[in-house]
Amino acid sequence: MAEKSAKSQKSGASRSDSLPPIMDRNLALELVRVTEAAALSASRWMGRGDKNNADGAAVEAMRKAFDQVAISGTVVIGEGEMDEAPMLYIGEKVGAGGPAMDIAVDPLEGTSITAKGGPNAMAVVALAERGGFLHAPDLYMDKIAVGGGLPEGVVDLDEKPEANLRNLARAKKKDIGDIVACILDRDRHKALIGAVRAAGARIMLIPDGDVSGVIAATQPESGVDIYLGSGGAPEGVLAAAALRCVGGQMQGRLMFENDEQKTRAREMGVKDPNHKFSILEMAKGDVVFAATGVTTGAMLKGVRWFSGGAYTHSMVMRSKSGTVRYVEGHHNFARKTWLTP
């Protein structure tokens, strides 16, 4: 594996001199190995029209890779409840032993994208100290997110889209017509899309992958200024973890369809069903986020196969330092036989 922008620890310095004992920076690279394994396995199903097998391959590979990571991890955002998912279910214990950590995973963000061979599918993992992540039930969350370097409270989930877009344009010293909002292409967003267009802003509609959509709002080269709309609550926590690392603002509110969902949320610790969660309520403390591209997108290249191996492209970041590293892996399956899909 070749790593870009790699930094080594100073020789002679003990870990306790410079690092908190609970979160070793070496875990960042270990997480990249986990997302690489999932991405490599999922990419075998790219364009084959079978999202279930693509997701299953990613889940199995990620679960096996966690066996090599020196943590005592608990999955708090995963593939569902124990009776719904065979691996990486909520509450599952993973890791080879070590500090207690909470884990949020999406082994294949963009299952339909992968099945169709579309852009921006990723394997995603976030790690936090125990209690660092919101235990979000598997339902929808209304979200709003912008990048860093903006006045606190420049956008608010309770404001109308026009007001948020106007305030954001003013803060960025842009015309509102230069603002681009990223929104999932769903029928439930028709009113939102109409309001954004009526305000004069432009829209980037995406078919899936709202974690990458939120992260795009923090990347100047993406052309996205703001993320709006509803998507999965677990994905909201993963997106919040990423924003904690690179800077940005995000708010979310759970969306309930019935009393049974509200009861489930209360059982997971959500006391007020109408609560507007801040980014720190969704992902607090020291957080590490890693992602590997399955298919090529705005931020990451997809898996590229060659005879006897493959290339992967990953990003890893940590909230404590704010450092973002891009890692290009060259995998030789003649030697790395355990990773052979």
Image (tube, helix red, strand yellow):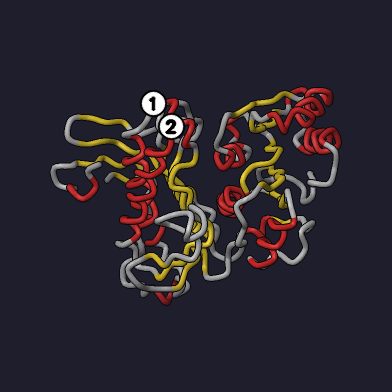
Question: Is 66 on the left or on the right of 91, as rendered?
Answer: left
Q: Nearer the viewer, residue 38 or 297?
A: 38
Residues tagged 1 and 2 counted as in contact (Cβ below 8 A): yes
Which is more N-terminal, label 2 or label 1? 1
Residue 297's spot in the image, x, y percent?
Answer: 48, 30
The amino acid type of the residue labelled 1 equals Gly
Q: Is residue 122 left or right of residue 205?
A: left
Residue furthest left as drawn? 334
Judge whether residue 118 can be spotted in this image: yes
**Callout 1: helix, strand or loop?**
loop
Badge 2 is on which residue?
Answer: 114
Q: In the structure shown, which secondary structural element does the residue marked by tag 2 occupy?
A: helix
Residue under the point 37% across and 41% down: 39
Label 2 is placed on what type of residue? Thr
Question: Which residue is pictured at 42% across the width and 62% down the height?
Answer: 25
Is residue 244 shown above or below 168? below
Q: Position of residue 189 (x, y in %)?
A: 73, 32
Q: Which residue is mark 1?
A: 47
